[in-house]
Image (tube, rainbow, N blue to C red):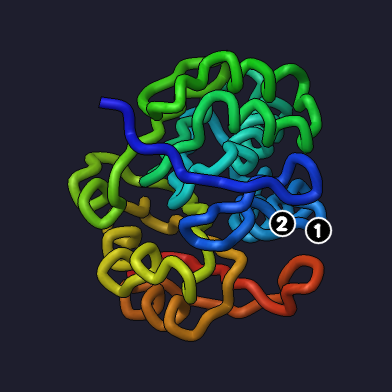
Amino acid sequence: MQQQSDPITWRDGDVPVSTRFDDPFFSLNDGVAETRHVFMAGNDLPARFRDGFAIAELGFGTGLNLLIAWDAFATACPDGTLHFTSFEAFPLSRADMARAHRAFPDFGGRRDALAAAWTGAGGAISLPGLRLNVITGDARDTLPVWPGRADAWFLDGFAPAKNPELWSPDLMAAVAAHTATGGTAATYTAAGGVRRGLAAAGFDVARVPGHGRKRHMTRARLVA
């Protein structure tokens, strides 16, 4: 059964906004630059990339984070394979994904390759240099039973005030349980509850400068 898509509206032409959470899927102030600052630099990427590197993510959205990571990985490890697992409760439809991608660079053809492979139902997708798995459903149910562990986490749910379920202490503990030794996490939010949840789960947490109008973001490294 196909997972229910997130009902959306559009802002500034091709920026999707979730009507369920009243929040845009990516920054209105250059989403590409924000992803590179928050999730890539926040996890010390691409410097840490190696063949088989594993990224996990809360909130697949438009796939922008994936595209940026995949593109950077292809440059850093041209003969390697990136493993990318994302947990998404409300995947975009194929048509909405394609429309959102109009706002993105081509990423060497990777944007269109992803759009062509996307069905709107998540699941496993294999593309050159990439093994993607979008696990649909409530992450509070799906993450604890996921058998994998990530070298880096992209925590990219909608704002904690609007989507608190994706930032609960229990879910942050599940993130830690599925993080490789020395693994990292990064997120655009510096909300105190999120930072405390990560710290309680065993991460060394730092509040650092954010992107654009966001004064702060969070970086974390597993130490427990």
- Screen quadrant of the C terminus: bottom left
Dot 1 crowding, Cα within 10 Å, few <14, some 14–19, many 20+: few
Which circle marks residue 29 in the picture?
1
Pinpoint residue 115: horizontal percent, then vertical percent: 60, 21
Up-down relation of residue 23 to residue 69 (above or below) = below
| Residue 221 visible to an observer of this rendering | yes
What residue is rendered at 56% in x and 46% in y? 8
Does dot 1 land on a helix, a strand or a loop? loop
Q: Quadrant of residue 5?
A: top left
Q: Looking at the rendering, in which quadrant would you find the N terminus?
A: top left
Give the Cα distance between marks 2 and 1.
5 Å
Q: From the viewer's perspective, is 42 left or right of 184? A: right
The numbered disc on residue 17 is none
| In-image side of 196 versus 69 (left or right) | left
Q: Residues within 10 Å of mark 2 (few under 14, many from 20)?
A: some
Q: Residue at x 32, y 27 (%)?
A: 2
Q: Is residue 164 left or right of residue 75?
A: left
Q: Nearer the viewer, residue 43 or 48?
A: 43
Q: Can residue 184 be seen at all in this image of the molecule?
A: no
- Residue with the mark numbered 2: 27
Task: Please tell me whether residue 36 is drawn above or below residue 115 in the rendered image.
Answer: below
- Asked whether the residues under the numbered discs 2 and 1 touch, taking CB atoms below 8 Å apart as contact, a structural biologist would say yes
Which three-letter amino acid code belongs to the residue tagged 1?
Asn
Q: Which amino acid is tagged 2?
A: Ser
* Rendered residue at 74%/40% (across/down): 14
- Please, what secondary structure does the residue beneath circle 2 have? loop
